[in-house]
């Protein structure tokens, strides 16, 4: 490892969080999100505590705040509609700065925004501390359907190959004087996309031949077995357990 | 003439694709253990079709293929696929796992080898192609020549009886070509090399077969075949400009 070729979501490091087996981290992130989502939206302080919990994980993982916040921007298009909710929702209304806002809508927007942001932050931390390859091993270990894991692993392997093919097709188009200027040119782009699809499909067939030639009979052989000790599990599950305590307090206080 | 321990024996092999296109019309040849043989032929001669018969991916025509005494057929397909290692033309098709190490491990792992024995296989195979330092790299970050060498390693890891290479020299720069040639020469397995790179065939293979229109049109020492201008013309095989097979001295 350490060849400087990792995915750009990943942040190379040797922190205690990096060192945890991938499946424990996956399970922890998943449980954390479940706990966050089941917290009542009125317990605003609980969400602040969750944020502090994530911040402490980030601190231990030596992921800088700037890196984390920049990656959080991915969320923007998804929560855009949350911003609209106070304007369009029904029910009791309040007036702020001359705008009439729905109370229900405000709560709804807060709910989506807070839970969404915490979920994305947890995923960003997971991605920043776990290599893609390891994530796949983790999913395999957590007994996700093998077909899904295989599909994901082929996506990672061939994503670059297909992007490269797309780039070559674009250069070939442009070398012959093509410029996509407007709607009239969409036909050409659509045909390129079609050609790319067929090429990828045919590559799929060739890859399958190569796999069958090496004895593939429907299931991937297990090459790397990942294991976790009890202590590692306990470490990883500290986050969701702490969150669970907060969540329960949120319900009963 | 046929040696007792033939690595590969093909007899009377004929095959037509489901769309009716007949690609092979009765192919006969045999390779002795340890031989390096080139299979030459123009585009569309049926070379790829023949290769896919060697490990039973295509079947259903007439004739038989025998690998080290084992007939290619449904009953021992796993054994056949372990014995016949095919290196396909495009290494991006051949290398489908996320890292070089896992890719090389794929074949032996599919055959049920685990743990230290698996690691040993992977290390040896990568060592033989000089790619051991690249074990943890993803294949798409290697150069084309390196990918081709890893593709050879993925097959060597299965310890095959016969190594079949489809256009091994295509897209390689001269240095990678030479490196691959050195690797192939250093291996002690039977090699069948499908190519229309005639100088490469002459360099590596003492014996050649010419496949043309679905039959073996000639079988003999590579130098002699390449020097027979009439034979070459009849089968659309052309030497590169300025290349004279008679002037090449071979170490074989």
Image: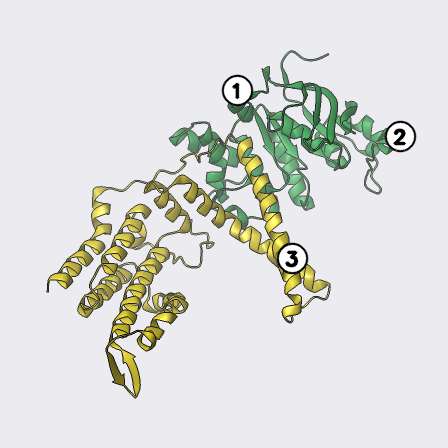
Chain colours: A yellow, B green
Position in image of residue A186 (x %, y %):
63, 65
Instruction: Check disc 2 and report its element: helix, strand or loop.
Output: helix
Nearer to me, B215 or B252: B215
Q: Quadrant of residue A71?
A: bottom left
Query: Looking at the picture, do discs 3 and 1 lie on one chain?
Result: no
Disc number lying in front (3 or 1): 3
Which residue matches tag 3? A191
Disc number lying in front (2 or 1): 1
Instruction: Check disc 3 and report its element: helix, strand or loop.
Output: helix
Q: Residue furthest right?
A: B230
**Direction from residue A236 to residue B19 in the image, left or right:** right
Position in image of residue A221 (x %, y %):
43, 34
Residue plotted at (36% across, 66% down): A72
Numbered mark located on residue B76 in the image: 1
Q: Chain of mark 2?
A: B
- The reply to whether callout 3 and callout 2 are in contact (CB within 8 Å) is no
Position in image of residue A199 (x %, y %):
62, 48
Which residue matches tag 2? B230
């Amino acid at each position: 490892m350490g060849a400087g070729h990792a995915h750009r979501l990943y942040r190379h490091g040797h922190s205690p969080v990096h060192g945890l087996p991938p499946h424990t981290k996956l399970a922890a992130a998943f449980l954390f999100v479940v706990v966050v989502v089941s917290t009542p939206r009125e317990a605003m302080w609980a969400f602040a505590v969750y944020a502090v919990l994530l911040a402490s994980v980030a601190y231990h993982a030596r992921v800088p705040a700037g890196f984390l916040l920049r990656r959080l921007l991915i969320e923007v298009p998804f929560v855009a509609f949350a911003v609209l909710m106070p304007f369009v929702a029904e029910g009791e209304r309040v007036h702020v700065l001359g705008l009439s806002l729905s109370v229900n809508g405000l709560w709804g927007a807060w709910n989506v925004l807070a839970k969404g942001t915490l979920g994305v932050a947890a995923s960003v931390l997971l991605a920043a501390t776990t290599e893609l390859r390891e994530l796949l091993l983790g999913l395999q270990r957590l007994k996700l359907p093998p077909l899904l894991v295989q599909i994901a692993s082929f996506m990672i392997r061939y994503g670059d190959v297909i992007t490269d093919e797309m780039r070559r097709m674009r250069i070939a188009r442009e070398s012959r004087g093509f410029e996509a200027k407007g709607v009239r040119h969409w036909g050409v782009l659509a045909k390129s996309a079609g050609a790319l699809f067929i090429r990828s499909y045919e590559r799929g067939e060739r890859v399958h031949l190569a796999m069958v030639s090496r004895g593939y009979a429907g299931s991937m052989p297990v090459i790397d077995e990942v294991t976790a000790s009890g202590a590692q599990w306990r470490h990883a599950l500290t986050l969701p357990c702490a969150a669970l305590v907060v969540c329960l307090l949120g319900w009963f206080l | 003439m046929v040696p007792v321990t033939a690595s590969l024996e093909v007899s009377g092999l004929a095959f037509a694709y489901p769309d009716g296109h007949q690609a092979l019309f009765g192919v006969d040849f045999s390779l002795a253990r340890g031989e390096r043989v080139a299979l030459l032929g123009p585009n569309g001669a049926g070379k790829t079709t023949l290769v896919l018969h060697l490990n039973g991916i295509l079947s259903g025509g007439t004739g038989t293929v025998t690998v080290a005494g084992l007939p290619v057929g449904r009953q021992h397909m796993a054994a056949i696929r372990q014995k016949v290692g095919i290196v396909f033309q495009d290494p991006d098709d051949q290398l489908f796992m996320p890292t070089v190490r896992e890719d090389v491990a794929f074949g032996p792992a599919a055959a049920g080898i685990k743990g230290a024995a698996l690691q040993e296989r992977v290390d040896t195979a990568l060592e033989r192609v000089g790619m051991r330092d690249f074990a943890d790299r993803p294949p798409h970050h290697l150069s084309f020549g390196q990918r081709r060498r890893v593709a050879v390693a993925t097959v060597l890891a299965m310890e095959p009886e016969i190594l079949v290479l489809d256009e091994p020299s295509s897209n390689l720069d001269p240095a990678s070509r030479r490196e691959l040639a050195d690797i192939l020469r250093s291996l002690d397995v039977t090699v069948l090399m499908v190519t229309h790179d005639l100088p490469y065939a002459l360099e590596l293979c003492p014996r050649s077969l010419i496949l043309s229109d679905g039959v073996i049109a000639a079988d003999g020492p590579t130098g002699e075949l390449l020097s027979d201008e009439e034979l070459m013309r009849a089968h659309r095989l052309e030497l590169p400009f300025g290349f004279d097979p008679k002037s090449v001295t071979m170490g074989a």
